[in-house]
Image: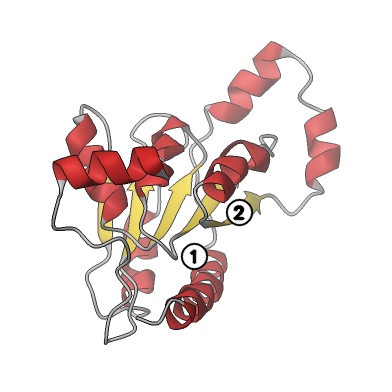
């Protein structure tokens, strides 16, 4: 938390620690990847999420983005939807009451990587495993380096209804958190 405060106070001194607002409407973001694990249906995701908030849903990728741009993005988003990947390392810069909905490709059920990072940043973490099959059974089928690499390189087309449902749940948690901090 002290690293977060130091970086944000240096880069964005007037930015609040929380974005709980009078409209009670969180700022939603979709952080995509352009290579592996790209969200092929990102436009549908953004369109369907837009009905859940009064602020514009922000879509971004971090290819060639500066550190300052990445920190700016994370610190201005209350609820983030993103595929599993290194782009999620900046979640510690998200505001108080923030949440992450991580999308995990089939055969890549590694929710604990960024789940533990979000927990350490006092954020809420949820994930959607993009398979109808049992994740633990799937993971037994990716024991070789080649099979893990193939799983990591998949393009994603997650069910929009599952994302909307997950974000609705996270909005409820965000509102509850905002009410508890007295904003």
The residue at the far bottom in this view is: 23
Using the image, determine if residue 172 lies above or below residue 125: below
Q: Identify the image quadrant of residue 126.
A: bottom right
Position of residue 74 measured from the top left corner of the image (x, y, whole percent): 31, 49
Which one is in front, 161 or 176? 176
Which one is in front, 120 or 69? 120
Q: Identify the image quadrant of residue 143.
A: top right
The earlier-in-sequence mark between 2 and 1 is: 2
Q: Residue at x 79, y 49 (%)?
A: 133
Secondary structure, mark 1, is helix
Secondary structure, mark 2, is strand
Q: Residue at x 60, y 54 (%)?
A: 127
Mark drawn on residue 160: 1
Residue 105 shows up from this direction: no
Mark drawn on residue 43: none
Residue 167 shows up from this direction: yes
């Amino acid at each position: 938390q002290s690293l977060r405060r130091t970086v944000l106070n240096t880069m964005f001194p007037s930015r609040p620690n929380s974005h709980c607002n009078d409209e009670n409407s969180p700022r939603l973001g979709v952080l995509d990847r352009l290579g592996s694990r790209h969200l092929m249906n990102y436009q549908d995701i953004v369109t369907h999420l837009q009905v859940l908030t009064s602020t514009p849903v922000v879509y971004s990728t971090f290819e060639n983005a500066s550190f300052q741009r990445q920190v700016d993005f994370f610190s201005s988003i209350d609820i983030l939807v993103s595929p599993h990947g290194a782009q999620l390392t900046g979640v510690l810069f998200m505001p108080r009451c923030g949440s992450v909905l991580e999308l995990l490709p089939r055969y890549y059920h590694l929710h604990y990587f960024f789940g533990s990072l979000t927990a350490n940043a006092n954020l809420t973490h949820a994930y959607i495993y993009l398979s109808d099959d049992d994740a633990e059974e799937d993971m037994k089928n990716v024991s070789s380096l080649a099979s893990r690499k193939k799983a990591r390189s998949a393009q994603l087309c997650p069910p929009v209804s599952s994302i909307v449902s997950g974000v609705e749940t996270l909005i409820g948690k965000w509102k509850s958190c905002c009410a508890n901090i007295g904003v």
